[in-house]
Amino acid sequence: MTNCVSVNETEAAAPGPMVQRVRMPTGLMGFEAIREYELIFQPEERPFGWLQACDPSGLAFVVVDPFLVLPEYRPDIPPPDVALLGLNGPEDALLLNIVTIHGPNRATVNLKGPIVINRHTWMAKQVVIANAIEYSVQHPLPVSQSAD
Amino acid sequence: MLILSRKPGESIMIDGRIHVKVVRVEGDIVKVGIEAPPEVPVHRMEVYLEIQGNNRRAVVTRKPPLPRVPLAQPARAGNPQAAGVVRPQIVVRPPANRRGTESAVQENRP
């Protein structure tokens, strides 16, 4: 089973900003105390979304569906994480990867540690993929040159 | 840091629920087995530090301007052969069933 539904299909069904609460029982690495986030997608910001902490810190992460920028990305989710998230197959998984904005024209994405979300329970975990060695934590995103 | 000496086959119990075992020593490689509840993530330190550092650099408290990024061709549902477009490849391996009462020590590729 290698099919999965990309974020775009979910977006297309619901015009306007998409907001979804997500639970992360193990938190993000370095931010383990934060267990609840809101996932926010504004259509005009495609392909980026926001993972916004539900605590007073106000901190947030830019996230992206990795397949929209690297279609050949083939993340191998380790079996214990599959079990923890209750995934019955790839079609249950939504993947979002954390983006670092270095400047107005430079951004990179972490391909070693995607956030894997169960699209039915909205439980998520930042997973170290079994084939992490094949990918970078700072994979460059191709940036369009402005046509202005 | 608490330092304990263990021979191969000997173990350590942490917090009554995390079991660390020296499985085997091969030259200068120590194979360490870890049994922990599923909500306790376990990572090689260098990978953890790399991702933790990256997460910390990525965090924003104020919306930065987002770069314009060209979209790769997304796969369309119901038409996987359209224009040679390949659907996203996520590898999900089901966990093996545990048998009997012996502890299963899982070995991950590095």
Image (cartoon, grey):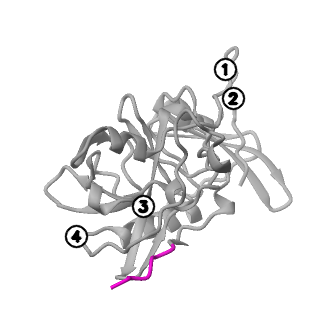
Chain identifier of the residue bearing label 2 in the image:
B
Up-down: is B83 above or below A13?
Answer: below
Q: Residue B104 carries which label?
A: 2
For mark 4, give the secondary structure. Answer: loop
Q: Mark 1 points at which residue?
A: B98
Q: Quadrant of residue A36?
A: top left
Residue A24 in view in this figure: no
CA distance separating discs 3 and 2? 33 Å
Q: Residue furthest top?
A: B100
Q: In this picture, which residue range is highlighted in magenta?
A: A142-148
Chain identifier of the residue bearing label 1 in the image:
B
Q: Identify which amino acid the numbered label 1 is placed on.
A: Arg
Q: Which mark is residue B63?
A: 4
Residue under disc 3 on the same chain as residue under disc 2: no
The reply to whether discs 2 and 1 touch (Cβ–Cβ < 8 Å) is: yes
Q: Write the residue at 49% across / 31% down.
A: A92
Q: Identify which amino acid the numbered label 3 is placed on.
A: Ile
- The residue lying toward the viewer, choosing from A56 and A147, is A147
- Badge 4 density bin: few <14, some 14–19, many ≥20, Cα 10 Å: few
- The residue lying toward the viewer, choosing from A48 and B60, is A48
Query: Which one is earlier in the sequence, the residue at label 2 or at label 4?
Result: 4
